[in-house]
Image (cartoon, rainbow, N blue to C red):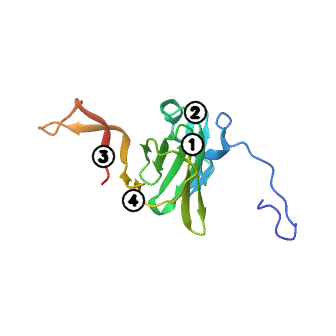
Amino acid sequence: GEGPDQTGNGLFSNPEIIHSDIGCINPASVLVINDGLLFESRKGIYKLSRNLQIESVGRRIRLDYPSDIIGNLLRDEKNEVEYYLEDGTTLVYNYQQSFWMTRPADNIKDATNFAGVKYQVTSGGKVYKADASFKRDGAHYRMRYRTGWIRLADANGSKNTQGMQRAIELAIL
């Protein structure tokens, strides 16, 4: 059921087990996006879709970045979620394109959306208005995009295993 209304009438339905071996281990990882809910489990980052299906969106995240998630921010105008790790790294997940990227040494400890404006708090206690400039204190930040395996074609147009690339690194200026 929908739960009680403003007058207290109505009931919640009984809880339902959706998936027995996946569960949220960190409340700081829970974020609602347009097509479901993201959360961290012992097996990585998962999405609970609106039709109650669970799918992995970041299985290797726990292995590649073992630091704890301590905060998050939804950047719905960019179709991105930012996860702030205890070691200062920021993980960014683009849920429309289904890819992850990192911003090392951002040192963001938490963020919030207040009156439609997004703010971030650093480990030093500074508060910034979050925007898409990737520039902070006059410095530009490099981003590393980690993609899945991309198979490249050779000169004849045939695919070969030597032509595989994994990561692309860009400087945003």
Q: Nearer the viewer, residue 90 or 80?
A: 90
Q: Describe residue 160's horizontal placement relative to residue 48 as left or right.
A: left
- Pointer 4: what residue? 133
Q: Residue at x 23, y 38 (%)?
A: 152
The answer to whether residue 105 is visible is yes
Q: Earlier in the sequence, mark 4 or mark 2?
A: 2
Question: Dot 1: what SS?
Answer: strand
Tag in front: 1 or 4: 4
Q: Nearer the viewer, residue 12 or 83?
A: 83
How far, Cα to Cα, is label 4 from label 2? Answer: 33 Å
**Quadrant in which the N terminus appears:** bottom right
How far, Cα to Cα, is label 1 from label 4? Answer: 28 Å
- Pointer 1: what residue? 46
How far, Cα to Cα, is label 3 from label 2? Answer: 29 Å
- Pointer 3: what residue? 170
Q: Nearer the viewer, residue 145 or 123?
A: 123
Question: Dot 3: what SS?
Answer: strand
Contact? badges 4 and 2 (CB < 8 Å): no
How far, Cα to Cα, is label 3 from label 4? Answer: 14 Å
Q: Earlier in the sequence, mark 1 or mark 3?
A: 1
Image quadrant assignment for residue 127? bottom right
Residue 44 drawn at (x, y percent): 55, 36
Contact? badges 1 and 2 (CB < 8 Å): yes
- Pointer 2: what residue? 43
Image quadrant assignment for residue 7? bottom right
Contact? badges 3 and 2 (CB < 8 Å): no
- Check residue 163 in the rendering and tell me which mark sits there, or answer none: none
Q: Earlier in the sequence, mark 1 or mark 4?
A: 1
Q: Could you tell me the amino acid type at mark 4?
A: Ser
How far, Cα to Cα, is label 1 from label 2? Answer: 8 Å
